[in-house]
Image: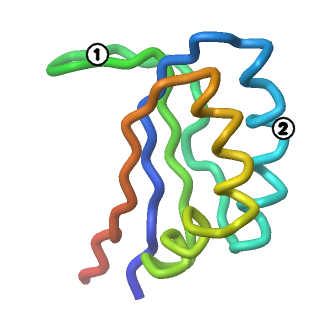
Amino acid sequence: MAKGYVIAHVDVNDAEGYKPYMAANPVIIAKFGGRFIVRGGRCEAVEGKHRSRHVVIEFPDYETALAFYRSPEYQENMKCRLAHAAADTLIIEGYDAP
């Protein structure tokens, strides 16, 4: 079964205000069997539009990634992100072929 991924490209406007969002996310993500693949780190934009921070979270499957994003816990935590950052976020199904 293909994994599911949440991919976010983020510009943080208020680093201090954003910290509670970052602190709460690992607990919520773990409840859905997810794990960070990318969380910040070095990056070089080689093509197209670029934001300052990039995050990739892996889940057991696409449906679980959607369930995480739509969960009441994440939706509540997302209010903090929306107040302190701008993001382009997508949920995508991984490639599962031999």
Per the image, label 1 sits on a secondary structure element best described as loop
Kind of residue at disc 1: Ala
Residue drawn at (66%, 65%) of the image = 34
Q: Position of residue 72 (x, y in %)?
A: 70, 66
Residue 41, by quadrant, is: top right
Residue 14, relative to residue 78: is it above or below?
A: above
Q: Secondary structure at mark 2?
A: helix
- Mark 2 or mark 1, whichever is nearer to me: 2
**Considering only vertical position in the picture, is 16 above or below 69?**
above
User: Residue at left 30%, top 18%?
Assistant: 50
Q: Amino acid at mark 2?
A: Ala
Label 1 environment density (alpha carbons within 10 Å; few <14, some 14–19, many ≥20): few
Q: Which mark is residue 45?
A: 1
| Closer to the camera in the image, 35 or 31 | 31
Label of residue 84 in the image: none
Q: Write down the quadrant of residue 93 in the picture.
A: bottom left
Q: Could you classify mark 2 by the number of other residues whose Cα lies within 10 Å: few (under 14), some (14-19), or many (20 or more)?
A: few
Q: CA distance from mark 2 to mark 1?
A: 27 Å
Give the labeled residue for mark 2.
23
Number of numbered discs overlaid on the protein picture: 2
| Residue drawn where x is 55% and y is 78% of the image | 64
In the drawing, does residue 41 fall left or right of residue 28? Answer: left
In the foreground, 51 or 46:
51
Q: Position of residue 55 (x, y in %)?
A: 52, 38
Task: Identify the image quadrant of residue 14.
Answer: top right
Q: Nearer the viewer, residue 40 or 25?
A: 25
As drawn, 92 above or below 81: below
Residue 61: x, y in percent? Answer: 48, 79
Q: Quadrant of the N terminus?
A: bottom left
- The residue sitting at 39% across, 60% down in the picture is 91
